Amino acid sequence: MEKNVLQETQETQKTQETQENKETQSMALNATSLQKFFSPDSIAVIGARNREKKVGGMVFKNLLRGNYKGQLYAVNPKHKTIQGQPCVASVIDIKSPVDLAVIATPAATIPGILVDCGKKGIENILILSAGFSESGDEGKKLEAAILDLAKQYNMRIMGPNCLGIIIPSLNINASFSNIAVHTGQLALVSQSGAICAAILDWAAPKKIGFSSIVSLGNVADIDFGDVLEYLAFDVKTQSILLYIEGVRNARGFMQGLRLAANKKPVIVIKAGRSQQGSVAATTHTGALIGEDDVFDSALKRAGAVRVTTIEQLFTVAQILSQNYRVKGNNLCIITNGGGAGVMAADAVSEYNINLASLDKNTILELDKKLPKFWSHHNPVDILGDATSERYQTALSLCQKDKNVDGLLAILVPVVMSDPHRVAKSVIEIAGNTDKPILTCWMGQQKVQSDRKLFLENNIPSFDTPEKAVEAFSFLTEYHRNQTLLLQVANNGINDIGIHDIHQPSDRSTFSTATISTTTISTAKGIIDLVLSQSRTILTLTESKSLLAAFGIKTTKTLEAHSPTEALKAGEVIGYPLAMKILSPDITHKTECGGVELNIVDSQILLAAYKKIIDSAKEKKPTANILGVTLEPMYIQSNARELMVGVFRDKVFGPVVSFGLGGTLVEVLKDRAVALPPINRLIAKQLIEQTRAAKILGKFRNMPEANRQAIEEVLIQVSTMVCELPEIKEMDINPLIANEKEAIALDVRIVVAK
Amino acid sequence: MEKNVLQETQETQKTQETQENKETQSMALNATSLQKFFSPDSIAVIGARNREKKVGGMVFKNLLRGNYKGQLYAVNPKHKTIQGQPCVASVIDIKSPVDLAVIATPAATIPGILVDCGKKGIENILILSAGFSESGDEGKKLEAAILDLAKQYNMRIMGPNCLGIIIPSLNINASFSNIAVHTGQLALVSQSGAICAAILDWAAPKKIGFSSIVSLGNVADIDFGDVLEYLAFDVKTQSILLYIEGVRNARGFMQGLRLAANKKPVIVIKAGRSQQGSVAATTHTGALIGEDDVFDSALKRAGAVRVTTIEQLFTVAQILSQNYRVKGNNLCIITNGGGAGVMAADAVSEYNINLASLDKNTILELDKKLPKFWSHHNPVDILGDATSERYQTALSLCQKDKNVDGLLAILVPVVMSDPHRVAKSVIEIAGNTDKPILTCWMGQQKVQSDRKLFLENNIPSFDTPEKAVEAFSFLTEYHRNQTLLLQVANNGINDIGIHDIHQPSDRSTFSTATISTTTISTAKGIIDLVLSQSRTILTLTESKSLLAAFGIKTTKTLEAHSPTEALKAGEVIGYPLAMKILSPDITHKTECGGVELNIVDSQILLAAYKKIIDSAKEKKPTANILGVTLEPMYIQSNARELMVGVFRDKVFGPVVSFGLGGTLVEVLKDRAVALPPINRLIAKQLIEQTRAAKILGKFRNMPEANRQAIEEVLIQVSTMVCELPEIKEMDINPLIANEKEAIALDVRIVVAK
């Protein structure tokens, strides 16, 4: 008997926990490599200057005046003193060890300086200077050169072209930002110095505090992955905020992200999520930008939460830091204003969460205690004259309801209401429940002191119902993604979601299904043959054989090299059938008149053969035409047309996609993606994300489709991708699913060495 | 030769302008009917009390202390004085005329009070009291009773169950809100008193001023339409804000809305836009809630702008009041931070506008004047060290570009920037261009004074790129909808979009195509026959005849009442063909095994006949089975499957819908709607809104589909709906379109007397 999903999940979890422990230990060791970067006992500012308007002057001033407790050295061959402090000509002249060198000299001077640093044994280098890969070919060469030096001397480099780092608790401001930063428990890691500056300027008057602020710049060496590994173990950091434009080292990124997100909330803004945005991002950072839905899927798998605006970044950080957690997405809304309830219910639909259906007993209890004309369902409208007692009654009854995962209390400042008394009773209830209670005191003058009161009591508070509902939706997303984080194949966390084509040796450990060596060797045989003929596209027969080797059902395809062979094949397949041109040189068959559908008898078949061959010869005279393929017309009223694909993301490597199939795929854009390996739960979730899911149940008199069969196809395709790195692209379209089976009618596979 | 769209539009516009003038005059007369309501020379507060916590006490206090300049009377039989003022027992006792009576007594006393008001000749009544239709059956009866009295005495009633009205310029606060309201040029009309209160509380500290505030309550008599007609001509009102939960009198609403939106910006929040929200709204207001996309379409046709949050309501009111207008949706972004540019570009995609493609010459000019590493496209990244001169150069070059409709200047407060100097130069440029320049100075501390400076100079200013781009998208939507407002059929503005089935006599004036009387009588003949047989659903043959009468192409359908007739029909139609059960009692043919597709020869045809009849007899033994219908299988590789429908909205009456067709319609949900009458431009826009539009161009080797033929179908369906009020529902699915024609393969029509 097959294991059910729960069992599988539990087992996976166990295996994973062991793995994780091992992993954590080795990570902890690695993480110490950036330890001194984030808590240096001594800092040398190379290029320190007197003029505070220049980068070198400003960073030195920031460290000097910021009351940094460690040793601070000014380095500048042109001066004896800088800002009243002694100055040396080179780091070589410093007698004591230096933990961190901050460099703010012109780009061209930096290789020489790095040699000095290397000789001096400085391991951590922060380069603020611009003039590297962001500024054309010359700069790219220079960046490569400093990277070589870093390797040679075993140095880690942050930047170049970055704002720097700030560690408020250690009074370290090794940046050229002059904005005061409060000490707190948020870490901010940003690829853009400007966005970093905007966030700091925004956060300062709100007294939002940070454990560390890191501007990564050009990411020549130290990447998100490295910093995430450090922050995962940084006790001063409670939540991590990332601003990302493009990821360079996907493997390192995912490794660091999973590690960190497993320990504390990680909230991500990824700019360039639209096509227009990603064109802009490519120009801006020169980073490789993959498909946005793939990035999204990777973030989810890693247990992080993605937001789109800076405001959301802080909202989510705040509610997650306060340890608000939900177990589902059913929200109960309690309001003294019907209109506000309606607006909240609208937002619930928009943010893809649910209005909780209150339990019958809850309704009965509410009926007993609320005035006659309460709304009698969720949103629970307790009417304009609602007292604090009425709020208390409604909240405590609803929070007990098993169908409720979280609550939103809305108050509209009508004359009969006493916002302050209600606020106090909400705070009381919130202290006695483990379900999150969010609040929205609408208006301004009459309610702002109560909003402050909520915040002081660690109760999330918002000024509009939309923002409150949105915040709840992020809580549910965090829960969902953290569950996904546990869905690891039984081979350790390192490799999840990262199947770099350049590292095929890792591949064999990814499989989620037991695959016989025969299967592999059959499959490899087909691919080797294709490659040996210098082809990259498999014929339909080859493609179907490949699928068949992995147990994926396909319709029969027969090849015919003459009219007579076609007639015989027709007898075998049966009418009606479809005929297509067979030629290694013709990919787009329809364009060459190479497809005839719905052939109903032998006479029409012979005519079709002639028509196809003639048309192909005329339209592609140079093509090597081998004959035709024949396959049954799959006319079946219970059939759902689906699509399963494989493509390579520029950043994350192979990706499996699923959605509605047929000829309209480009228009329907019903594509959900997942990074392999895919187990059953991930396959289920992949299907659930699509519109296709809606036609798999009972639909238009059709019985339910066999979902398990579709899941199998997804798992098998994932396995194929893991086992056969040669597969570049695959397009099963349509995959037909009915109540019995899932069967591939057409498939196109592209391979490469 | 056919007129082109431009000609048509121009002519329509002319006709319309004349119509509009006439209309305006008659409206102006009507509008005066609420004149005294909004500027009464004398007010009687019936139910005035001493206790200021009670509604009657509060409203009297608000008027008394608010320094109202007219005559104020307290009416209460139990007192001689109220709040130190003389008090009479009844309005009858007041010697001078009374323009407005404000009633705050218990519901049950109100009919008696209204009789007094009627006798006294008071025409304007504002009822604040609750206890009417919102509170069950008793209340509903009471509300009907007061409405009867209003008719009898020719009184207009606002409310009951409302917050009241506030006219700051006249010092009138005839409401029980105690929030101070500034005088200004915004009118706010809200169906919810609570939302009204929240908006006022929110607006007060921001010093947002109002011309009038109206809370409509239960809308027993005075509705949105009446108030809009008044506000359209109110010189003190520059923009109108509406909060709507459900419309009662759709005709009056649309009439008032069109009139108002033609004269000043009207911005609408319609709560209950989602299904969950509209269930909540129905409970809350008892209003009839139609389909949200129909409401949306009606708003667009009327030239109004719809927003979803209170914050947007004010943002849009502000930028529209400042007379910012755009002519297209191409935005140019100028930024000193690449990351901020990327975020703005993301928002551009999200809000369905365009990043302007800069003209070659603009790029060349920018190249001459900007530093080497500027982004070289839009978003125009002028780099972190951008000076005010550089902003000025970029802005003035880009605003001249003919491909640019509006500009967004973003500044990130990096150290090298001088936010204040840049702000001043942006203000200078903005004064010299008629294209809107929006600004986003990111951050807080360093930029808030500049944001204020922008506002003082009437330049829209936002704290995030997302909000700025969103605001621009509303400007473009306003432009689009105002264009639609001009798209009136040549029969006056009154009837646009409102085809109340109860007023069929209006119908004959709506036609946008010249229809012969023969067509009408043929169509009526078919419908009359169906109705005379007590049927409501037309047979396929009848339905297709109806379409044919209006010039819509259909595939041939033949009826056969015996196997022999079926064979003959098969010869006429040709193979392959489809056969369907013919029975007035069977609607869902597939369920009864009543459909056989792809019949390829006479032998299979005979078998199919038997199978269909047998199956129908077995599954529906009581059905009157007349035989089968036969039609050709329309297998055509260039065919696009579309859908054209008609349904009746609960509020707005008949609606035409369009989208992707086929069996997946429910899943694809590709539905755009338009209220008839539909002319060619509206038909074009209707098509453009759908995903279906994407497959009508060159697609998968298919030549472009004949869009004009599809437009004709939409126009003809609109005409049918206008001419034949009996049509309740129509579902043409699929409508097949190819490069030659648009042809209806299947259609279902439901009629009613």
Image (cartoon, coloured by chain):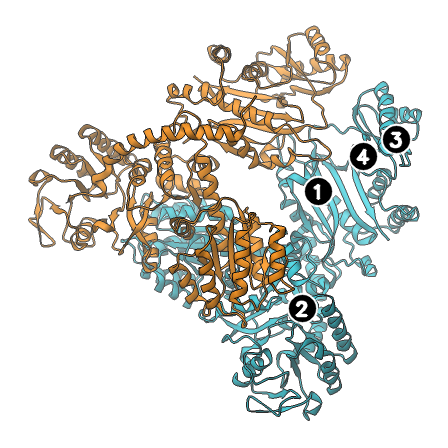
Chain colours: A cyan, B orange
Mark 3 or mark 1: whose residue is earlier in sequence: 3
Q: Mark 4 vs mark 2: same chain?
A: yes
Q: Amino acid at mark 4?
A: Lys
The mark that comes first in sequence, 2 or 1, is: 2
**Which residue lies under the disc numbered 4?**
A589
At 52% from the left and 85% from the top, the residue drawn is A65
Q: Secondary structure at mark 2?
A: loop
Label 4 with label 2: CB-CB less than 8 Å: no
Q: CA distance from mark 3 to mark 1?
A: 44 Å
The residue beneath circle 3 is: A617
Circles 1 and 4 on the same chain: yes
Q: Which is more N-terminal, label 2 or label 4? A: 2
Q: Residues within 10 Å of mark 4 (few under 14, many from 20)?
A: some
**First along the sequence among labels 4 and 3:** 4
Q: Would you call the spot at circle 2 few (<14 residues within 10 Å), some (14-19), or many (20 or more)? A: many
Say whether residue A629 is visible.
Answer: no
Q: Secondary structure at mark 4?
A: loop
Closest to the camera, between mark 4 and mark 2, is: 2
Question: To which quarter of the image does residue B671 belong?
Answer: top right
**Dot in front, 3 or 1:** 3
- C-alpha distance separating marks 2 and 3: 54 Å
Mark 3 belongs to chain: A
Q: Are marks 2 and 3 in contact (CB under 8 Å)?
A: no
Q: Are marks 3 and 1 on the same chain?
A: yes
Residue B10, numbered circle: none
The mark found on residue A708 in the picture is 1
